[in-house]
Amino acid sequence: MLTLNLLRENPELVIERLKIKNFDAKKHVEQIIELDINRRELQFESDALLAEMNQLSKEIGILFKEGKQQEANTVKNKTVEIKERIKELSSKSDEVNNKLNEILVQLPNMPSVMVPMGRTPEDNVVVRKGGEMPALGNKVMPHWDLASKYNIIDFELGNKLTGSGFPVYKGKGARLQRALINFFLDQNIAAGYQEFLPPYMVNEDSAYGTGQLPDKEGQMYHATLDNFYLIPTAEVPVTNIFRDVILNDSDFPVKCTAYTPCFRREAGSYGKDVRGLNRLHQFDKVEIVQIQKPENSYQALEEMVNHVESLIKKLELPYRILKLCGGDMSFTSALTYDFEVYSAAQQRWLEVSSVSNFESFQSNRLKLRYKDKSGKKTILAHTLNGSSLALPRIVAALLENNQTNDGILMPQSIVPYTGFSILD
């Protein structure tokens, strides 16, 4: 959530920057400024009345001591009127604050000045590429056929048990999943991230804190009886560990990693986009989260990008890194890099990670702050997160790109985790 100070001091900047995200904020900003003025006027009057009431209370005490009971009762009656007015002002203030918050949460995060202009994924900027494109000839099988051939992923069984988008991994397929999870976690821990194993459901406050509510309410599975939400990513519970927390200057950097299953309703994609592992309702992912001081957050973002790149390199997959344009960015992000790996059979790029800096957008909702070196001033921290990595499309690319007549070769980096070098 954007801060009121920013909206008060630079309303035109907010309006202009949000145009890059194809969001017309003019009406929202005008309403916010008007409500903020109204809110502060109500607060000013209430504070003045409280001060007056305190003064009158002292006068009442003095009058009673002097034996002037009638005058004291007259002043006392006036304090009753003031109390009623303060109560009325408090009720109006609550209404204004609720309306103000309703509009504030509709504003996306401002994109960084580094975000390229553009409206569609075609406008994203390729930052760099790496890895070697596979040369497999014409008889290349897509991963869903390979999964059936080697009996490692059963899509029909998942459909029977739950529905489409819930595959069942079997045998070496299940071992490959576990191997990748452990490999990613070990790599993250070696890079200085502390491992967490959070809940897979969160409450409404947590979903609000990281920006899933109200923006992505329809994309989350909702356990209505308990009002819990199944997490769309480990970012949600892990970042919320620091909700309502004031860190010390010495606590930085805060670096966390977690494996969780992720649950998402997906809509609007058809055909090859939803075949096999391309788009699932439940999938496994390892996440990295950082909490940083504002002056260090973009350096941390580059470090996270380099770390995710190192993982893909160790998997020996062809990849490219994209800087997302304004129109393709998420509601909460200030700057996002997407990672895509090449799918040999599908002959297309598959997104496997997004690494983002949210600046203070999430921390303002979370009330996540830190004390400066003096210990007197509190400042909103910056939050960042990235996939390291999401498994389904990584598995799809590993199966397709490494297929041979004898089986599917495993990258050497994960053989100690899989226990096999070829999947046959």
Image (cartoon, grey):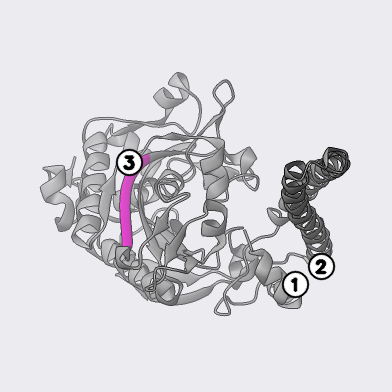
Q: Earlier in the sequence, mark 2 or mark 3?
A: 2
Residue 127 visible in rendering: yes
Q: CA distance from mark 1 to mark 3?
A: 50 Å
Q: Badge 1 is on which residue?
A: 15
In the rendered image, the residue lying farthest to the bottom is: 113
Residue 356 location, x and y as percent? 47, 64
Q: Amino acid at mark 2?
A: Lys
99 left or right of 382 in image:
right
Q: Is residue 258 magenta?
A: yes
Mark seen at residue 26: 2
Q: Amino acid at mark 3?
A: Leu
Q: Badge 3 is on which residue?
A: 146
Q: CA distance from mark 2 to mark 1?
A: 6 Å
Residue 346 location, x and y as percent? 44, 53
- For the C terminus, the image quarter is top left
Task: Name above or below for residue 205 compared with residue 291.
Answer: above
